[in-house]
Image: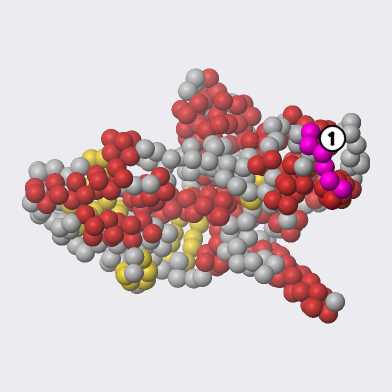
Amino acid sequence: MVLKSHICRNVLSAQKCFLLTLLRAGKEVMHESIVIEEEQAAMPGPSGTCATATDGWLTISDPTKAISQCADSFLRIHETKSPLLLSMDIRKSPAEQDMALISFYKRTNVEWGRPLNCKLEGSSNYKLQWSKNKVFPLSLFCQTVHCVTGDCAIGQGVTRFFFSKCMEKLKSGFCINFANSNVTRLFEGEPGHLVPSASHFLVESDMFMVAGRMVGHSFLHGGPCLLGLSPAVVHVLLGGSPETATVTLQDCPDLDIRETIDLLDGGSILSDKDKQRVQDLAHAWDLPCLTEKNRRWLFEKLLIHAVIGRVTRQIKQLRRGLKETPMWTLVTQRPDTVALLFPKEGAGNFSPEVLLQRLTWPHEDSDDDDDCSVDTKCRISGYLRQFIANATPTELTELVKFWTGWEIIPPSLSVEVVEGRYPTASTCFETLRIPGHYKDYTSFKCDILACIDSCHTGFGLV
C-alpha cells in the first residue's frame, strides 16, 4: 500500500507539472467557462473567421482548386496586417522546442490569416548526427534557406519546416513529460484509425484547441494535412451524430477494451469469465447487463462509447480550434473537400515515377558556380535516379522533406551537381545540390540516407 501511494503521488506530481508547464506557455490566455465552450463547440455554426472572402471557391468544380482558392482568398484579406512570428531555438532541448510550438498556438483572439514569419534560431551551430555507424557534421549536409542572419534562419523553407513539424507532432506526440512518459500523444491508435487521447488533462490544458489551430493554420499556407484520423472521428467532428458514424474495432485504441468488446461480435457462446469482462465494462459505462436479446445492441453501444463517447470533449475542442480558421468554413460549405483535408493514412505517399517526372536534371550548359564535367553530372544523376526508383515510401517522403522543407511534392524540383563533401538542399528554391565526388552508388546512398535523417535538425549554412 505504501508503494502504491508513492506511485500515485508521483503520477499526480507529474500531471501537475505538465499542467503548470502548459499554463505558463499560455499564461496570457483567459479561459472561458468549460461548459460555455463545450456548448458553443457543439453548435455546427460558422467559423470565427467568416470574413467576406471571394466566393469563387464555392462554385469551382475541382475540390483541389477550391481548397487552394479558399486559402488564398483569406490570406489576401489579411495580407496588409502585421505578421505573426513563430520562432524556435533548435539549440534547446526537444521539450523546449515543442513548447515553443504549443505557446504559439495557445494564444487566443488571433487572426490566423495574417502573414506569417518563421524563424529558426541557432541554425548555423555545429551539430553531430550519428548515422550508418558514422558521425556526420550536420553543417556539412544541411538544408539551406533563403536567408541566414547571424545564427537565425528565415524563409519559405523554414515556414514549411514548421508546418511539417506541427503535423508530425500531432501524430507522434510532443516531447513533454506527462505521468512519467517522455512523449505526450494527442492522438492514439493504429495508423488510419487515430482517435483523440482520452486524457482529461489534455482537455483541461486546451491541447486539442491547439491541435485544431495547427491543422487549420497549415491548411491556410498550403501545408501538410493531419493524416490517418478515424473516419468516425472526422464524421462527428464535422457535426455528424455518433449513432450514424461508421465505427470499427480498429478504431478502438485500447487493446484490452477492444478484446472485451470483440467478445460480443458474432454468436459464439461466452464463458463465465468472458461474460464477467463484458459485464464489468458495461457497468463502468452505465450500460445495461448483457442478455441474449441485447448482445448486438450492447456491442454497438460499447464500441461507440469506446471510440467516440469517451472523447466527446476532445472532439468538441478540436472543432473549436478549426472554427478559428477558414478551414471550418470550407469543409462545411464544400463537403467534397473533406477527403482531401482529412486524408487516409498513406494518401500523401507518391510514387517514384511522379517524383522523377518533376525533376529538372542538371544539363551541360548550366550556369552552376562549380564546374563539373558532363560525365560527372550523368553519373550523379544516375545514382539519384536509382535511389528514387528503389526507395521506400518513407524514404521518398523524407527525401522531399529534406529537399523542400515539408512532405508536399512541388510542381518542379531542381538538382545541381557541385563541388563539396555532402549533399545540401536549398529548401526555399527546392534545389538539391549533390557533390560530384561519388564514384559508387553505395557511398552515395549512405550519404543521402544520412541527409534525410537530418531533415529535422539540419537547417543552416556551412
| Picture residue at 60% right of the left edge, 31% below the top | 331
Where is the N terminus found, in terms of image quarters?
bottom right
- What secondary structure is the stretch in magenta mostly built from? loop
| Picture residue at 34% right of the left edge, 69% below the top | 133
In this rendered view, identify the residue nearer to me: 339 or 39.
Answer: 339
Q: Which residue matches tag 1? A: 295
**Above or below: residue 423 compared with residue 50:** below
| Local secondary structure at mark 1 | helix
Q: Residue furthest bottom?
A: 2
In this rendered view, identify the residue nearer to me: 224 or 277.
Answer: 277
Left or right: 427 with respect to 233? Answer: left
Number of callouts? 1
x, y (%) of residue 390?
31, 45
In this rendered view, identify the residue nearer to me: 40 or 98.
Answer: 98
Left or right: 425 with respect to 177? Answer: left
x, y (%) of residue 314?
72, 47
In the image, the segment drawn in magenta is 267-272
Q: Quadrant of residue 193?
A: top right
x, y (%) of residue 313?
76, 46
Residue 208 visible? The answer is no
Where is the C terminus found, in terms of image quarters?
bottom left
Residue 425 visible? The answer is yes
For the residue carrying disc 1, how many other residues have a C-alpha within 10 Å: few (<14), some (14-19), or many (20+)?
Answer: some
| Picture residue at 72% right of the left edge, 46% below the top | 258
| Picture residue at 43% right of the left edge, 53% below the top | 161
x, y (%) of residue 98?
55, 62
Say if the magenta span includes residue 363.
no
